[in-house]
Amino acid sequence: MTSNSPASSSQPNSTNLQTNPQSTDNLANDATHASGLSHLDAQGDIHMVDVGHKRVSTREATAQGLVMFPAAIYQQIKAADGITKKGSITQTAHIAGIMASKRTHELIPLCHPLPLDKIGLAFVYDDAQSAIKVTATVKVTHKTGVEMEALTAVSVACLTLYDMTKALSHDIIINDIKLISKTGGKSDYSHS
């Protein structure tokens, strides 16, 4: 049975599948499109931002997150200096954070692959919150920033701390992941 109705047509809906050719030619160089978002043009088409016209500069970003534990579990972890049956939770999380930061472009669809100059992570016991505070700083000399690389490093390091300690408790909260600062590029930022 054949039908002439548009709903049963075998032709794809060109409105939904076709990309506007102007989106990459005319608008990709403008970091702020009519949509207000750098990855969307005025027609709502998604694209990777063209950074070809930007100047190379040293860019650095720092992000932070908390892994919060029940008080008794936190004290147990701190007393053992982060050593569990699985090994050192912070050393494992440190490696995981570095690996994740280097692969950010594979995890976040529109991120550029970057030759990172530095990735550093720090882990600090926070007695007031029964938490381990994770901080990541990432640096690059390139045409685009490394905020996503720093946030990815922190996020995966926090997830790794969870994985390394979940045998002790599932009442663990990953909280307050945020960008602390960024320098280089068009504008600097510092979380107040």
Image (tube, helix red, strand yellow):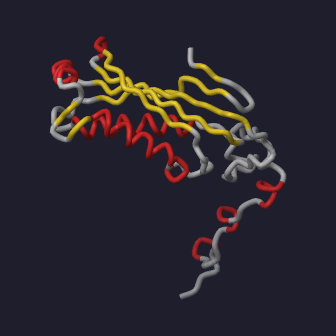
| x, y percent for residue 52 | 77, 49
For residue 68, above or below residue 170: above
Q: Is residue 142 above or below residue 131?
A: below
Describe residue 156's horizontal placement relative to residue 106 as left or right.
Answer: left
Establish if 21 lies above or below 38: below
Q: Residue at x 58, y 76 (%)?
A: 8
Q: Which residue is at the front of the view, 181 or 16?
A: 181
Q: Residue at x 55, y 50 (%)?
A: 105
Residue shown at 64% from the left, 77% from the top: 11
- Residue found 69% across the figure and 30% down from its top: 184
Residue 158 or residue 46, whichever sits in front:
158
Which quadrant of the figure contains the C terminus? top right
- What is the residue that sits farthest to the top in this orientation? 128
Residue 40: x and y, percent?
A: 69, 46
Q: Nearer the viewer, residue 21 or 56?
A: 56
Residue lying farthest right? Answer: 26
> What percent of the width, then of the height, locates residue 4?
64, 80
Find residue 17 and report its image quarter.
Answer: bottom right
Task: Give 12 or 99, whichever is nearer the viewer.
Answer: 99
Instruction: Identify the image quadrant of residue 59.
Output: top right
